[in-house]
C-alpha cells in the first residue's frame, strides 16, 4: 500500500465514524481495544491530533492518535505488514508523541516499539474473572457483604453527583497519570459514550461525604456479546483500612453478574495490594498493556 499519510493534523468531527470503524475491526481481530478512553474523550472534544491512512473514501487502513505527548496507533487487520505502523509511528513522533500505549501485548506492537528503540516504562495487567467464578458468586444465594454502619450505597445521579465524584477521583488517584487528571469535560465526554449508564456507577456515602465508588461498565466484546468491567474503583484516602474496597468490589460484581458472563479490570502491574485482592476474588491475568517511551 502506497497511500500517503494524512496529517498529523487536528481531528475533525467527520473523522470519528471512520476511526470508530477502524478500532472495531482491530478489536474483533486482536481482542484488545487500540485506543483507550482518554483518547476517545480527547477525540470527541476535538483536542487530539491524528495521522490517517485511507484505504478508500470511507474506510481507514491505519491511524495514529496523538494527545499531548502520548500517542496510540492501529493498523487494520487486512493492511498489516506493509510498513504502515512504522510510518505512523514516525508521524506521531514528529507531532510530539513521546509515550505510546501498546494494548493487548500484541507481538507486532512489541516488535515495532523495540525496532524503534523505545523502552518499556510501565505495564497494566488486564485481569479477568472466569465465568465459573462469576456464576458461583451470582448463584451462591448468599447476601452481598453488609455495608458498615453509617454507610449507604446508591447509583450516581447525573448532574448532582458529578462534582463529588470528580473531587474523590482526583484525591484517590492523585498519583495516577491518567485517571487522576480527569476533568469535568472528560467526564462529560465519557458520559456520552454508547456504553455509559449512570446506573452502573455505584457510590458509597457516609452521610453527605462520598467515601468510595465502583464505576462498572458493560460494553460489547470482540464477538459483540456483552462484557463487564470494573472500570474504576476507589476509596477515599481518609477511609482506607476499613475493607471498603472489597465491599465495593463484591457489590459491583453482583451488579454485573446479572447481565454479563465475564468481568475484567485493569490494574498497575506493581500495585501489589490491589493485585492480592483481585486474585483472592478469583481474577486471573489475561494480557498486558505496555507503555513505551520513545528515545
Image (spheres, rainbow, N blue to C red):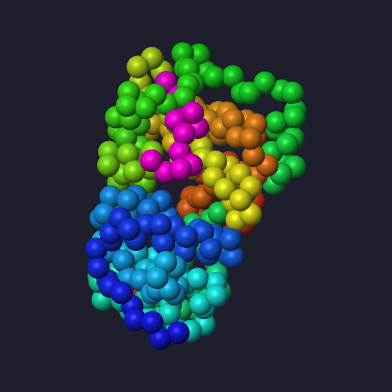
Between residues 191 and 134, which one lies in front from this camera angle?
Answer: 191
Compared to residue 180, the image places residue 110 above or below, namely below
Compared to residue 283, the image places residue 164 above or below, namely above
Residue 115: x %, y % from top left: 44, 83
The answer to whether residue 175 shows anywhere in this view is no
In the visual, does 34 lie left or right of 238?
Answer: right
Where the C terminus falls, by quadrant? bottom left
State the residue at coordinates (32%, 71%).
51
Compared to residue 86, the image places residue 101 above or below, namely above
Residue 276: x %, y % from top left: 58, 45
- Picture quadrant where residue 73 is located: bottom left
The stretch in magenta equals: 192-205
Q: Is residue 24 magenta?
A: no
Residue 292: x %, y % from top left: 40, 69
Between residues 265 and 78, which one lies in front from this camera angle?
Answer: 78
In the visual, does 107 lie left or right of 130?
Answer: left
State the residue at coordinates (50%, 50%).
267
- Picture quadrant where residue 141 is located: top right
Q: Residue furthest front?
A: 57
State the residue at coordinates (51%, 50%).
266
In the visual, does 15 lie left or right of 252?
Answer: left
State the residue at coordinates (59%, 19%).
146
Between residues 205 and 198, which one lies in front from this camera angle?
Answer: 198
Where the N terminus falls, by quadrant? bottom left
Q: How many marks?
A: 0
Between residues 225 and 143, which one lies in front from this camera angle?
Answer: 225
The answer to whether residue 109 shows anywhere in this view is yes
Amino acid at each position: 500500500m502506497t497511500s500517503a499519510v494524512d496529517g498529523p493534523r487536528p481531528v475533525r468531527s467527520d473523522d470519528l465514524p471512520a476511526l470508530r470503524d477502524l478500532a472495531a475491526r482491530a478489536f474483533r481481530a486482536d481482542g484488545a481495544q487500540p485506543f483507550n478512553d482518554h483518547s476517545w474523550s480527547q477525540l470527541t472534544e476535538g483536542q487530539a491530533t491524528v495521522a490517517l491512512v485511507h484505504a478508500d473514501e470511507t474506510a481507514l487502513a491505519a491511524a495514529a492518535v496523538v494527545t499531548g505527548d502520548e500517542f496510540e496507533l492501529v493498523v487494520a487487520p487486512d493492511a498489516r505488514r506493509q510498513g504502515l505502523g512504522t510510518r505512523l509511528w514516525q508521524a506521531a513522533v514528529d507531532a510530539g508523541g513521546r509515550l505510546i500505549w501498546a494494548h493487548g501485548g500484541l507481538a507486532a506492537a512489541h516488535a515495532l516499539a523495540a525496532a524503534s528503540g523505545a523502552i518499556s516504562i510501565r505495564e497494566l495487567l488486564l485481569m479477568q474473572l472466569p465465568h465459573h467464578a462469576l456464576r458461583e458468586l451470582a448463584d451462591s444465594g448468599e447476601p452481598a457483604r453488609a455495608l458498615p454502619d453509617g454507610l449507604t450505597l446508591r447509583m450516581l445521579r447525573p448532574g448532582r453527583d458529578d462534582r463529588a465524584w470528580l473531587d474523590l477521583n482526583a484525591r484517590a488517584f492523585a498519583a495516577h497519570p491518567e485517571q487522576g487528571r480527569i476533568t469535568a469535560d472528560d467526564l462529560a465526554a465519557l458520559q456520552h459514550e454508547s456504553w455509559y449508564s449512570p446506573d452502573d456507577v455505584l457510590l458509597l456515602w457516609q452521610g453527605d461525604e462520598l467515601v468510595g465508588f465502583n464505576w462498572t461498565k458493560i460494553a460489547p466484546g470482540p464477538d459483540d456479546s456483552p462484557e463487564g468491567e470494573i472500570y474504576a474503583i476507589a476509596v477515599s484516602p481518609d477511609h482506607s483500612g476499613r475493607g471498603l474496597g472489597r465491599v465495593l468490589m463484591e457489590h459491583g460484581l453482583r451488579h454485573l453478574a446479572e447481565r454479563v458472563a465475564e468481568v475484567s479490570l485493569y490494574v498497575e502491574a506493581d500495585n501489589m495490594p490491589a493485585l492480592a485482592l483481585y486474585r483472592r476474588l478469583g481474577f486471573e491475568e489475561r494480557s498486558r498493556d505496555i507503555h513505551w517511551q520513545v528515545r
